[in-house]
Each structure stands twice: as C-alpha cells, then as structure tokens.
Image: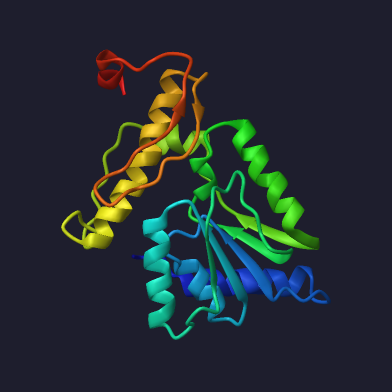
Amino acid sequence: SDIDYSAWAQFIKKIIEKESPEIPHELVLDLGCGTGSMTLALADLGYDMTGVDISTEMLDIARARAQDAGYGDSILWLCQDMRSFELYGTVGAAVCCLDSLNYLLTPSDLASCLRLVHTYLDPDGLFFFDVNTPFKFEKIYGNNAYILEDELTFEDEEGKKAFRHTASHILAQAVKRLWPEVKLAIGPATKDGFYYDFDAPFNFSPDDFKKI
C-alpha cells in the first residue's frame, strides 16, 4: 500500500495534543478498522486501541497482524456494525479513516453512527474522519476505471477477503441506487464469497439481478 499509516497516525497524535493537551486520550477507537493498519500505527504511538469492524475476515487478519507485531491480546477487536456498535466504556478519541463513513449509504445510518460516536467519546473527545464527496464520485471517479498494480490480488487469500468485503458494499450501493426504499442490514464477506441482507417490500427477480 502507498498509504503512510505511520505519518497519518503522527498527524492524529499532533492534533490531539494541540486541541486537548490537558486531557489524557490514552483510549482510542478505530471505527471500521479493517485489517488494522491504522489501529496498529496508533498503538505504536502508545495508545490503548479498540478496533471495530463488521467483517470477521478482516478482523482475523488484524488479530494476526497484532500478534506478529508483539501486541498479543492488548488490542480489543470487536466484530460490530458501526451503526449499532457497543463499547465497554468511553474513549478519548475516535478515528474512522479511508472513507469508511462512505459505506453508510443513508442519512439515517450516518446519524446512527455519529450518535454512537458522541455517546462513547469522553467530554471534549475528538473524532477524526474523512469522506469522499459527491463531487469526487461524480467528477473525478465518474466512469473511469482504475487498475492497482502491485497491490492485493484475487490470487492471494488476503486479496480475496479484501475484494469480497468491498464487493458486498458495492452490491449494497447498487441496490440503494435502484431502490432507495430498501433497508440495509448486514453484508459481510464470507469464506467463499459475500452476501448482503436486505429488507425490501418486494421479492428480487432475475431481471432485478441483471439491473444490479
């Protein structure tokens, strides 16, 4: 990956120390942590980390990476939906990086997530996040196709898990664009593929699958 997680983590630490120098922020939540790259980068800076992600496969990779890095079981990994997660207490700061909030496809889903972040943040706690805007999707991404070289491939087990995880979110986005009234449940990657649970006022037909 060409992402410098260490530099990103250092930037977050700098902002925390600048904005709340008198408040300890040892406990940090990584929301939508994926395979734990940012979680581990922040742990390297001395933060007590909790990682939350809906994908069991991604969390398995994160746990293995944490073990390899010598953290043992000191990092708490929770398999939960960012729209309904529960923590054991409050945290001083929360991060949600790499456009993870863009996986929330409705205003109500986003509101649910933000309410929970507010609930579990200490008073004057900080929330770091980044998002892709409609302008970027429409004007920059648009109908362009991108090829990532020397990255994960479907030939690798980790690559398969990443592709399946992403594909489940693309499926959900396609369904919401076609039928905004459909409600989303969960859509994890699995050992052999992926799926998404939908609450729809109709039954999907073969023609609907073609549209998707």
- Name the side, left or right, on which 143 lies relative to 200: left
Question: Which residue is depicted at the point 51% across and 55% down?
Answer: 32
Pick out the residue farthest to the bottom: 70
Q: Is residue 141 visible?
A: no
Figure check: 57 above or below 116:
below
Using the image as rendered, state which of residue 2 and residue 128 is in the foreground. 128
Work out which quarter of the rendered image holds the N terminus and state it: bottom left
Answer with the quarter of the image where residue 29 lies.
bottom right
Q: Is residue 59 left or right of residue 19?
A: left
Spot occupied by residue 118 in the image (x, y as percentages of width and height): 74, 52
- Quarter of the rendering occupied by the C terminus: top left
Instruction: Identify which residue, 49 or 14, lies in the foreground.
Output: 49
Report whether residue 167 is seen: yes
Q: Residue at x 42, y 71 (%)?
A: 63
Residue 71 in the image: state x and y as whole percent: 49, 82
Q: Residue furthest left?
A: 155
Instruction: Look at 62% across and 76% down and name the residue there.
Output: 48
Q: Is residue 32 above or below residue 170?
A: below
| Depth check, front residue: 168 or 205 | 205
The structure residue drawn at horizontal position 39% and vertical position 74%, both measured from the top left corner, is 65
Percent x, y for residue 186? 47, 39
Q: Is residue 6 left or right of residue 161?
A: right
Q: Is residue 124 above or below residue 72?
A: above
